[in-house]
Amino acid sequence: MMRGLFQLTWLEIKIFLREPLGAIGSLVIPVILYLVVGRAMNRGGPPRSPAGLDFLGSGLPVMVSVFMAIGAVTSLVAIISIYREGGILKRLRATPLRPQTILSAHVLAKLLFTAITLTLMLMAGRRFYPPGLKAPVISFALAVMFSTLSILSMGFVIASLVRTARFAQPVGALLFYPMIAVSGLFVPIEAFPPGLQVVAKLLPLTYIVSLLRGIWNGESWFAHLGDVAALAIAGAIFVALSARVFRWE
């Protein structure tokens, strides 16, 4: 089983890298975004305002990491939809590989690309970090991977509900990117009207932002057990939902 999983994961990686636009979008664009924003804020010297320092200190890496997680999900949505529409999923299911193995290979491939992109981002953006910043890079990387894993199952649900591959990725983007506005990434949740605060607390992206920001600022995982639990519950719900609605053909 493990051998088949690794072989299929390696095959998915090679197929993905054959598409230059997809590879550039997943591996290069987040790093460019990090560098462009960081350089713009450092133009003419270090940021003068406390808000600017705070954004470079935690907001920027968290923002790019959130976009990376969303990009992994929307990319998964597109690939699964294309495979199903082209009959590839149906043929894969006819092989001795278990359905869990086939779907897990897609998840592992996305997590690997997320890890590579995160590494490139952290290496390229070191000069933009405020002096004295000692971010727990390994712990933050684990938080990014956990956050990405918790919402990847949503990709299987979206890919099953959208009938054609052409609309799968745009629909995924339309569902995820508006969540950013109420996730607390740019505006504190407490500043929203009470009704919007309730909506924000129902969205997994809110807990992803809270977890990533806290870990990057040096807080312990125990301080964010609520975020971890919320993401684990969300992941479990979407795994159960995808098991019911996922279509192979």
Image (spheres, rainbow, N blue to C red):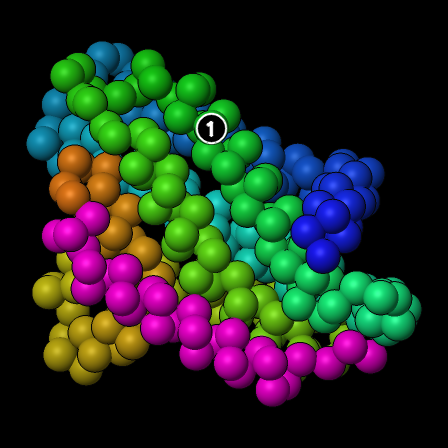
Q: How many marks?
A: 1
User: Which residues are the magenta region?
Assistant: 221-249
Q: Residues within 10 Å of mark 1 (few under 14, many from 20)?
A: some
Give how far across and how far down residue 221 sits, in percent. Answer: 20, 48
Could you tell me the amino acid type at mark 1? Thr
Image point 78% across, 77% down: which residue? 248
> Which quarter of the figure is the N terminus placed in?
bottom right
Image point 83% across, 71% down: which residue? 93
Image point 23% across, 54% down: which residue? 210
What residue would you read off at disc 1? 119
Taking the image as shown, residue 102 lies to the left or right of residue 53, namely: right
Give how far across and how far down residue 39 sits, in percent. Answer: 37, 21
Furthest toward the bottom, the residue is 244
Taking the image as shown, residue 137 lies to the left or right of residue 31, namely: left
Q: Main secondary structure of the magenta part?
A: helix
Examine the rendered structure and indicate whether residue 206 appears above or below residue 146: below
Examine the rendered structure and indicate whether residue 45 appears above or below residue 168: above
Nearer to the camera, 17 or 175? 17
Q: Is residue 185 visible?
A: no
Q: Is residue 160 visible?
A: yes
Is 248 contained in the magenta span? Answer: yes
Examine the rendered structure and indicate whether residue 210 appears above or below residue 244: above
- Helix, strand or loop under label 1: helix
Image point 20% across, 23% down: which residue? 134
Is 155 contained in the magenta span? Answer: no
Examine the rendered structure and indicate whether residue 139 appears above or below residue 87: above
Give how far across and how far down residue 215 sits, in percent. Answer: 23, 42
Give how far across and how far down residue 191 sits, in percent. Answer: 12, 64
